[in-house]
Amino acid sequence: MKHPSHDPNCIFCKIVAKEIPCQKVYEDDEILVFKDINPAAPVHLLLIPKKHIPMLESVTAHDAPLLGKMLGLVPRLASQEGCRPGKEGGFRVMVNNGADGGQEVYHLHLHVMGGPRPWKK
Ligand code: 5GP
Ligand code: ZN
């Protein structure tokens, strides 16, 4: 279903609206999690709000609970998707913001990367 904030030019909004398929890992009313199409690590997930928020710098105080919920989901989903526990395991959480930050898709997303090294990036 299209979110009220749906941006027809945004690839991640199209994934939320199921206009483009994805390898879904988790979904609730506010959040969608799927596998990155070009994984940089053995586990590479993208966590997105269904709401079209272009960048980390466009979040408002109103979005704080949503961002907290996204971050709170990370450990469980990372482990569910194969990130190893303990000191030898773990995962990386990353947000690219703007061109200097390496952002390519202007719909806020958390990268979650893990699995045995070496990684591609
Ligand atoms: P950014 O550089 O904006 O932080 O990251 C965008 C990420 O989205 C990249 O890692 C890229 O591989 C991934 N990506 C771009 N288009 C698609 C898509 O259509 N499907 C999926 N699953 N991932 C995508
Ligand atoms: Zn969007």
Image: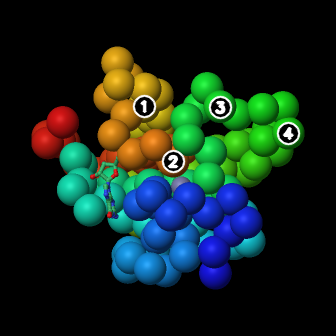
Q: Which residue is mark 2?
A: 107
Q: Is residue 54 positioned above or below 2 on the image?
A: above
Q: Which amino acid does the dot numbered 4 rest on?
A: His
| Labels 1 and 2: the sequence-earlier one | 1
- Picture coordinates of residue 34 (x, y %)? 44, 66
| Labels 2 and 3: the sequence-earlier one | 3
Could you tell me how far apart the alpha carbons at marks 4 and 3 are, in whole angstroms?
11 Å
| Labels 4 and 2: the sequence-earlier one | 4
- Picture coordinates of residue 89 (x, y %)? 37, 44
What's the residue at 24%, 54% (across, down)? 39
Q: Which amino acid does the dot numbered 1 rest on?
A: Asn
- Picture coordinates of residue 18 (x, y %)? 49, 80
| Most distant residue in the top direction | 100
Q: Which residue is mark 4?
A: 62
Could you tell me how far apart the alpha carbons at marks 2 and 3 are, in whole angstroms?
10 Å
The CB of the residue at mark 1 lies under 8 Å from ligand 1: yes
Q: Which residue is mark 1?
A: 96
Could you tell me how far apart the alpha carbons at marks 1 and 2 are, in whole angstroms?
11 Å
